Image (cartoon, rainbow, N blue to C red):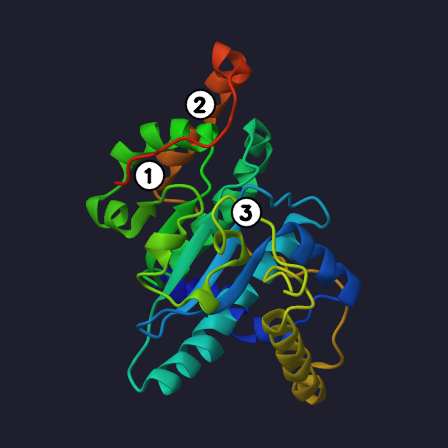
């Protein structure tokens, strides 16, 4: 009921008819909130890539980033998952997410509020949409936070998270074909680089983002008769209050980052190290 009320109060059913204008602003969001659809798993699930470490959230307001994220969720549920179900000939209700930690630094402390906002929306209003989270290219700062956060997670959540060595290419190829690998996983030691002839999956120019943005603009045109032409300006979405478990996790991450920032650990290299999976 809380989820349904949240959708009603924030007009979530119409979010895909509210394009982020102008297009240059949407491009800026894509450049600083790094996410993209890279293909499908061997089981037919959509594979999403997230550039956690390199996302800066510094080119637009929180409202715009939240609007874009919710649009991505709604497009996944209304278009991508039904399309995946049709292609595979079976019901597909979940996706896989590959989380690239390249570039993650102590400055991530400045992004905790934005990340916690997005996480609260997902946990309370889009639950159980991700089957597995694959963590790749994890630096020292991530391993330090993971060590203190892991004991706080519920067992079912821990089972969803797999921390892979380096880019994790070999492990990911067990669940998806090479063509569906995110660009930062395709070559060992390649970091977040992509080949010169490949459009970055995060880019506004990538086919997935072009299709999503065009879909939103088309929905807006269809609704013009009833609600008038699309206007510039972000949606103001009420962020659900995170539950006690999530609040404790965020508090623990903040505390650990503060400890790293103030202690001797800051002088150590953040080069990648081997991390044991959950």
Residue displayed at 44% across by 33% down: 142
Q: Evaluate whether residue 252 shows in this view.
A: no
Q: Which residue is mark 1?
A: 244
Crowd around label 3: few <14 · some 14–19 · many ≥20 (10 Å): some
Q: Position of residue 158 (x, y in %)?
A: 26, 45
Which circle marks residue 255 in the picture?
2
| x and y, in percent, of residue 251 in the image | 42, 29
Q: Which of disc 3 and disc 2 is earlier in sequence?
A: 3
Cβ atoms under marks 1 and 3 closer than 8 Å:
no
Mark 3 — residue?
190
* Residue 276 against residue 220 in the figure, above or below: above
Residue that lies at the very extreme toward the front in this rendered image: 188
Is disc 1 placed on a helix, strand or loop?
helix
Look at discs 2 and 3 and give the one toward the viewer. Answer: 3
Where is the C terminus found, in terms of image quarters? top left
Q: Give the answer, above or below, for where 198 lies relative to 194.
A: below
Query: Are there few (<14), some (14-19), or many (20+) residues within 10 Å of tag 1?
Result: few
Q: Secondary structure at mark 2?
A: helix
x 34%, y 60%: residue: 127
Q: Residue at x 54, y 57 (%)?
A: 183
Q: Measure how far apart labels 1 and 2 are at the Cα level.
A: 16 Å
């Amino acid at each position: 009921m809380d989820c349904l009320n949240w959708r009603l109060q924030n007009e979530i059913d119409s979010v895909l008819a509210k394009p982020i204008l102008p297009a240059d602003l949407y491009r800026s969001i894509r450049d600083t909130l790094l996410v993209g659809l890279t293909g499908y798993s061997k089981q037919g699930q959509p594979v999403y890539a997230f550039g956690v470490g390199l996302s800066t959230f510094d080119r637009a307001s929180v409202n715009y980033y939240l609007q874009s994220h919710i649009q991505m969720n709604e497009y996944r549920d209304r278009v991508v998952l039904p399309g995946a179900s049709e292609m595979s000939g079976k019901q597909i209700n979940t996706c896989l997410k590959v989380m690239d930690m390249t570039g993650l630094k102590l400055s991530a402390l400045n992004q905790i509020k934005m990340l916690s906002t997005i996480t609260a929306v997902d946990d309370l209003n889009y639950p159980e949409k991700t089957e597995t989270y694959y963590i790749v290219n994890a630096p020292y700062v991530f391993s330090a936070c993971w060590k203190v956060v892991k004991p706080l997670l519920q067992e079912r959540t821990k089972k969803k998270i797999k921390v892979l060595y380096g880019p994790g290419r070999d492990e990911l190829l067990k669940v998806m074909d090479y063509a569906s690998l995110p660009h930062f996983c395709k070559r060992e030691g390649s970091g977040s680089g992509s080949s010169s002839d490949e459009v970055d999956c995060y880019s506004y120019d990538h086919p997935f983002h072009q299709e999503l943005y065009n879909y939103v603009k088309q929905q807006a045109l269809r609704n013009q008769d009833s609600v008038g032409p699309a206007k510039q300006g972000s949606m103001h979405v009420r962020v659900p209050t995170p539950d006690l478990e999530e609040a404790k996790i965020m508090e623990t991450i903040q505390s650990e980052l503060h400890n790293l920032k103030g202690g001797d650990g800051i002088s150590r290299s953040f080069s990648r190290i081997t991390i044991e999976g959950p």
